[in-house]
């Protein structure tokens, strides 16, 4: 089956911890991550690299090209090294890893749940490519319960998450990324506790715009994306696929990328309401 882009895998950064509280460090980190290798190696090209705005291809019209051209990021080890040096992060002890401007060592972890093999491969690539830029990051895979506790209590350093699924509005993603107000337990997003009232106001303003007013939505999204890509409180990396398997031995007329009327070839999560039910309605017996 074809692999539709279903949600965005985002690297959440704990903005309450040093040096992840520094926007300059976070921006350098974005350039240090080898997303092409995640796509090519961890996923064998079944997925696509994410737009820096995080928006799925189905909402690509709300990604402001001028903002992305000015503030977007790509994998560039040398650029990451330059940005680190400009922000005062240099290797003062010769161990191959930069220290913070105050001379303290930087030792960070990137996590995902144990057993999630694709994400495990991805965080290995994240750690290795960051190390090549001089950032000491190690991959770790706690069990799901420990990972989820750390996620919601913001006791992690950096971790992957993809809880915003398909939607007819970019607000769905930005409500996850910039969920507010900041609480002790962040159970609905903004797991790195990025605290910026200007961003919160922008996301609330987007929520108030009717989905029929695309011009106003685009203008609101451009403001969100400008602040997002300036502060870089989290890093969109790739689009997870809408994983699905089916057999034509008993039923046919499954949706494919060449179908005239595309529906979603899956029924898990909330996809019943987004096309999964239509998939079942349109099936035909293989041997009527």
Image (cartoon, rainbow, N blue to C red):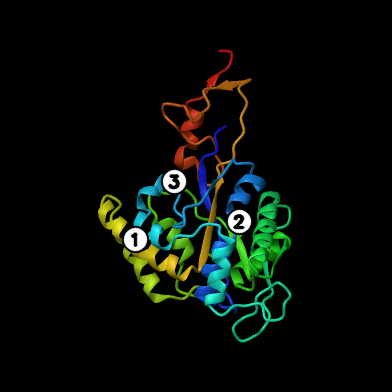
Q: Earlier in the sequence, mark 3 or mark 1?
A: 3
Q: Is residue 192 visible?
A: no
Q: Earlier in the sequence, mark 2 or mark 3?
A: 2
Residue tagged 3: 57
The residue sitting at 62% across, 64% down in the picture is: 159
The residue tagged 1 is 222
Q: Residue drawn 61% across and 30% down? A: 246
For image coordinates 60% across by 47% down, the residue present is 39
Circle 1: element type:
helix
Q: Is residue 203 left or right of residue 257?
A: left
Residue extending furthest toward the bottom: 102
- Residues 282 and 83: in front is 83
User: Do the CB atoms of the residues marked 1 and 2 lie less than 8 Å apart?
Assistant: no
Left or right: 136 as drawn, with respect to 9: right
- Quick check: 212 above or below 250? below
Q: How far from the left and from the top, in percent, is residue 60?
A: 39, 48
Q: Position of residue 194 (x, y in %)?
A: 49, 73
Which residue carries the number 2 mark? 34
The crowding category of the residue bearing disc 3, from other C-alpha atoms within 10 Å (few below 14, some 14 to 19, many at least 20), is: some
Q: Label 2 to label 3, Cα distance in Å?
A: 21 Å
Q: Is residue 265 visible?
A: yes
Distance in Å between CA atoms under marks 3 and 1: 16 Å
């Amino acid at each position: 089956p074809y692999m539709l882009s279903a949600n965005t895998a985002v690297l959440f950064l704990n903005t309450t911890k040093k040096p992840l509280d520094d926007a300059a460090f976070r921006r350098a980190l974005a350039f240090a991550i080898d997303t092409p290798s995640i796509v090519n190696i961890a996923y064998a090209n079944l997925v696509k690299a994410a737009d820096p705005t995080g928006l799925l291809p189905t909402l690509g019209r709300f990604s402001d090209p001028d903002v992305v051209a000015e503030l977007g990021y790509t994998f560039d080890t040398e650029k990451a090294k330059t940005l680190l040096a400009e922000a005062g992060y240099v290797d003062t002890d010769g161990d191959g890893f930069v220290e913070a401007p105050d001379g303290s060592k930087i030792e960070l972890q990137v996590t995902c749940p144990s057993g999630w093999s694709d994400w495990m491969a991805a965080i290995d690539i994240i750690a290795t490519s960051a190390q090549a830029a001089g950032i000491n990051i190690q991959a770790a895979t706690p069990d799901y319960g420990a990972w989820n506790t750390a996620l919601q209590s913001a006791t992690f350093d950096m971790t992957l998450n993809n809880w915003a699924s398909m939607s007819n509005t970019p607000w769905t993603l930005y409500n996850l990324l910039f969920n507010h107000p900041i609480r002790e337990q962040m159970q609905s997003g903004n797991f790195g506790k990025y605290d910026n009232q200007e961003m919160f106001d922008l996301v609330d303003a987007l929520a108030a715009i009717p989905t029929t007013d695309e011009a106003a939505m685009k203008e609101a999204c451009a403001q969100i994306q400008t602040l997002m890509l300036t502060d870089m409180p989290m890093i969109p990396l790739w689009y997870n696929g809408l994983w699905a398997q089916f057999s034509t031995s008993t039923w046919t007329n499954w949706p494919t990328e060449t179908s005239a009327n595309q529906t979603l070839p899956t029924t898990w999560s909330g996809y019943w309401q987004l096309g999964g039910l239509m998939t079942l309605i349109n099936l035909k017996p293989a041997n009527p």
